[in-house]
Amino acid sequence: MLEQIKDWIERLRAGSTGGPDREHLPTPKTAGDQRLSDCRLIVLDLETTGLNGAKDEVIAIGAVAIHKNSVDLGDQFDLVLRRPELDISETVLIHGIGPEALTRGHETEDALLHLLEWMNGDPILAYHSAFDQKFLEKTLKQILGYTQPHTWIDVAEMLPAFFPDAKTGGRGLDNWADFFGLEVSARHHAAADAMVTAELTLAVINKAQKNDLITLKDLVGKLKYYRQLKNMHRPN
Amino acid sequence: MTASPQDSERPQNTRAIMTFLREHSPFSNMDDSHLAHFAEHASLRFYADDDVVLSPEDGPVKRFYIVKQGRIRGERARDKDGETETTFEISQGECFPLAALIGERPTRTLHRASGDTFCLSIEHDTFVMLFSESDPFRDFCLRGVSSLLDQVNQRIQSGAMASIGSSNSLDTPLERYAIRNPIVCSPDLPVRKAVARMHENNVGSIVITDDERHPTGIFTLRDLRTMVAEEKGPLDTPIGQVMTKDPCCLTAQADAFEAAMLMAEHHFAHICVVDDENRLIGMVSERDLFSLQRVDLVNLARTIGTASHLRTLVSLRTDVSRLVDSMLAHGADSGQVVKIITTLNDVTVRRVLELNIKKNDPGIPFTWLTFGSEGRQEQTLLTDQDNGILFETPEGMTEDQVREKLLPFAETINKELAECGFTLCKGNIMASNPKLCLSGQEWDDWFIRFIDASTPQNLVYSSIFLDMRAVFGPTKPLELLLDKVLARIRKNALFQKMLAGNAITRKPPLTMFRNFRYVQEDGKKRNLDLKRQGLAPFVEAVRVFALANGVGEANTLERMNKLAEKGVFDPKDANAWQEAYSLIQAIRMRAHQEMLERDEPLSNYINPDDLNPLDRRILRESFRQAQRLQQKLELTYQL
């Protein structure tokens, strides 16, 4: 994958026409009748300079794709952005991306264009997706002026909906990873977190299909129902 | 560990998978570039408890799996009560399903997840790439495969993968070749019109059929040339009078090898393909079979078979060696190669006989016999003459008078064959020996004495006479003789037991700990004798079973086929033994070719240290199969 990106960046620099066309970026797909068993889903994780959506910025993007109930390692995205101007003092100890890495990172505009192209408008799944959605949409708008909304699904919400009896001892990604006995190769590395999120998603999709949820719409419907149920039980 | 600069440029998830792989065999021994190739092409899947991962119903296995987390259990239905039993468990870091993947067949065992399980897997082409590029990976995969047969198949396939990629082997059934729709006509069509029809269709042959499309003859451009040159008749002659009658036919299921052998033996270039009711469905030509292989077998056989001088025959022998070389390089099976060598040797022997009869006909009908490896059609380039004559005594002559005429003739033949590269037999098992130039009656008497009064000692030298074949002359006298000999051996349990005892005197060269037992081990020389230690145990044991069960074939592989058909051998055993035998033969022939290349005299000795680890392992396993075969002999004859 890295090779592809490099090739593509090289071509872009050389001024050839091979790169993504800003005017014709993919249109996001809605959660419709595409079958869970063969639609492509993006599982994404971002590293940022902090938690404040108003002032913090994206510094790394990691993502994998699920297709036909499997994660293909040949179809992944793993980039640190070139943003040496950002202050990372607050979070550098968490994600380990220091000023030098940000200097050597990939040109942000190119990277984002390529991300959009690679995602191909497919639905995006993330753990606590509201956070990633806010940051990604903000960045896409700032840098590219891109505002089309993708379909987002929260893996943190799917897991308890499909495994209501799981004793995870908490609602974090680490709790669920432990519950399934998963090892995270490098926690708080965007791509590694995306991978473990994808692994949990595979378990969810396996369960969903056994519960006769065939399409993405079925899955989203189940989540909506689960949310309503939860709200009803919530003490006022 | 210090990460190579390359490594740090790989995506995190690829690196993570490489790290995981490195913790497990065989990946721990593999090059980083191969691990990266694996990781970049891997997919990750999840299986919940009890989910089926692989099933016999899925068809040939297409992926190679490694358990990343969780467990897989193998389930098989027990034969006696149909209950499911767990046959194995595969846990983290272990790979499956090796035998099925390598054998390109469906798995025989249902693979089910045991608990929440994640597996990494790669597709067949990635597997093939790693298999052919990475020695540790290949070794590991083959070690995981228990049966020799699978190993052998894989070895042949990997050989084919590594080679130029010619996909047509001689094992391919004829139906897979582009069988051409043949041009046909009825026997009353004048030659002129038939040739016009061939011309219109731009083909070199026409098949003559009857009303039910049964081929009755064939007419080729070569026949036309002969017809014109020898003024056999006007072009208005009905084609039925000049065609070659009863053309050679094979069914579509026959393989290319059979077709090639028929062509080589009879020197023709076309074979009719027929259905089960002998109706013509197509035609294959020499060119169809060999266009991909560039093996000029048929042409070579024809050149030998029509050579007009001894010195032409002598010079053609280098072409035979070159042909063997190219066949081995194309991954031809050793059983096929020895048959081809034998066929070409037969053609040479026949031609030497024909040329001499033309010059100086002894005027006595005789059958030229071959014994031993030539009799078994198992000749390699290193070959002795083992031959004899079976003659009919003409009215009014004594057998000694016949010998007086035949022996000088036989001596010339033996000498000329030696010039062609067939070494004179040191034990004087040659047709010019008066003891081996006998009438049918004399041969029969000889065998009676041999069978009834043999001692274990003289048996060692004489058993090659039991592998007997006619190369030239009428075959009927030999058939009559063989029938009598076989019937006698079947009735003589003592002789069988003696033969069996003799067959197990040569033990396969393995120590108790399954290491190689060397013939000589003085300092540097650690040699195995592939012929006497490797092949002979098979040849001799199989001969006993064949003779005891009325199998008339002399060829060891064919004898095993017949023995399996008769239920004497378990088909699986027969298969394993055939493969083992063929493999030793293949290794021996490869060694011969290498010796020729280095201009060394041919020998049957090899040092297993010179083989690659895979061949060594396969050789060891082949010897183990020879031990099993000898054990069967011991059991049968209570030795």
Image: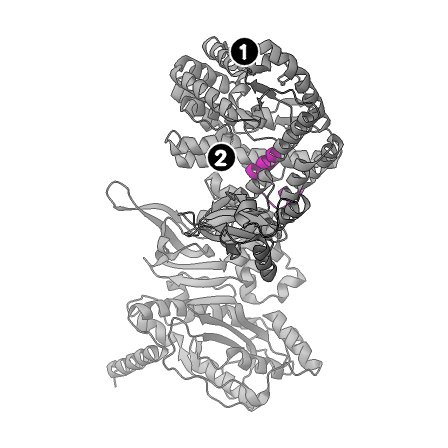
- Range of the magenta residues? B326-343
Is disc 1 on the same chain as disc 2? yes
Label ID, residue B458: 1
* Circle 2: element type: helix
Q: Nearer the viewer, mark 2 or mark 1?
A: 1
Q: Nearer the viewer, residue B204 or A219?
A: B204
**Kind of residue indicated by mark 1:** Asn
Mark 1 Cα shell of 10 Å, populated few (<14), some (14-19), many (≥20):
few
* Residue B60 screen position, x and y as percent: 43, 54
- The image shows residue B431, relative to residue B119, as above or below, that is above
What is the CA distance from the residue labelled 2 to the residue labelled 1?
A: 28 Å
Of pointers 2 and 1, the one earlier in the residue sequence = 1
Snapshot quadrant of residue B591: top right
Where residue B518 appears, as percent x and y from the top left, is 61, 24
Q: Which mark is residue B402?
A: none
Q: Secondary structure at mark 1?
A: helix
